[in-house]
Amino acid sequence: MRAYISRFMSAVMAGICISIGCIVFLRVGGIAGAVLFTFGLLAVVHYGYALYTGTAGFISSWRDFADLLMIVFIGNFIGCALTALAALASYDDIRELAQKVVEQRTTVSYLGVTFRAVFCGFLMTTAVKFGREGRWLPLLFAVPLFILAGFYHSIADAFYLLAAGIFTTQTICNYVLMVVGNFLGCNLYRIVISKDSKKEA
């Protein structure tokens, strides 16, 4: 039980770190905002916090999926919710800025949302793998890359959605597709390696 609680609290902190990056991006915007957002992921990797997109690509079984990944996702989401509440109480423009982000997502087709989330998942797993090896430069590129390319990060978008307060059928469906797409993208490298291994055998 203690391990579950520790993992959950770690996930909450990861959600807070990513949400801080979201706040900076909303208030600064552009390339500068995208680069500064990177601090959130750097903090997650440095402290070893449990982030959905940093965990999904490394689970080894369905038990991990249920016992590990779901706890991480819920903790991340709660961390985003807490930070969104704090941000809404601290800044007059956060809701409006977040609403613009969420509304822009609704102009993209469901298939487009899924693909953009897959691309982001692949970038995040790749960046985290480098970070775990002590190579931080890919992290500095991956985050601005996914933001400027318009890819979707499910935990960042949890903050935007919660801060915006726009809960419609479309925004909720979009978010579910982001979560699924991130998971697929995080595991894309394993799918490719598995196929190559079968060919060699």
Image (cartoon, rainbow, N blue to C red):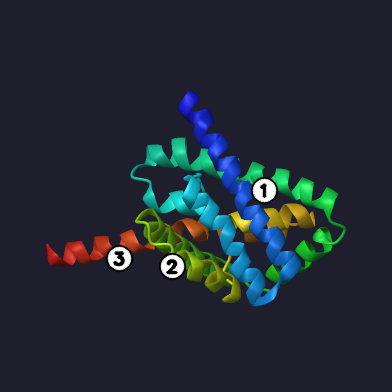
Tag count: 3
Q: Is residue 47 above or below residue 105?
A: above
Three-letter residue code for mark 1:
Cys
- Judged left or right of residue 96, residue 193 is left
- Rounded to the nearest whole Å, what is the CA distance between mark 3 and mark 2? 21 Å
Residue that badge 2 annotates: 138
**Residue situated furthest right in the rendering:** 92
Please name the residue shown 45% across and 35% down the image: 67
Mark 2 vs mark 1, foreground winner is 2
Residue that badge 3 annotates: 192
Position of residue 72 measured from the top left corner of the image (x, y, whole percent): 52, 42
Lower sequence index among marks 3 and 2: 2
Residue that badge 1 annotates: 80
- Judged left or right of residue 98, residue 1 is left
Q: Please state which of residues 109 and 193 is positioned toward the viewer in this rendering.
A: 193
Three-letter residue code for mark 2:
Pro
* Marks 3 and 2 close (CB-CB < 8 Å): no
Position of residue 148 measured from the top left corner of the image (x, y, whole percent): 59, 75
Please name the residue shown 67% across and 48% down the image: 80
Q: Quadrant of residue 78?
A: top right
Mark 3 vs mark 2, foreground winner is 2
Quadrant including the C terminus:
bottom left
Q: Quadrant of residue 31?
A: bottom right
Position of residue 181 measured from the top left corner of the image (x, y, whole percent): 51, 61
Q: Please state which of residues 127 and 192 is positioned toward the viewer in this rendering.
A: 127
Q: Secondary structure at mark 3?
A: helix
Please name the residue shown 33% across and 45% down the image: 60
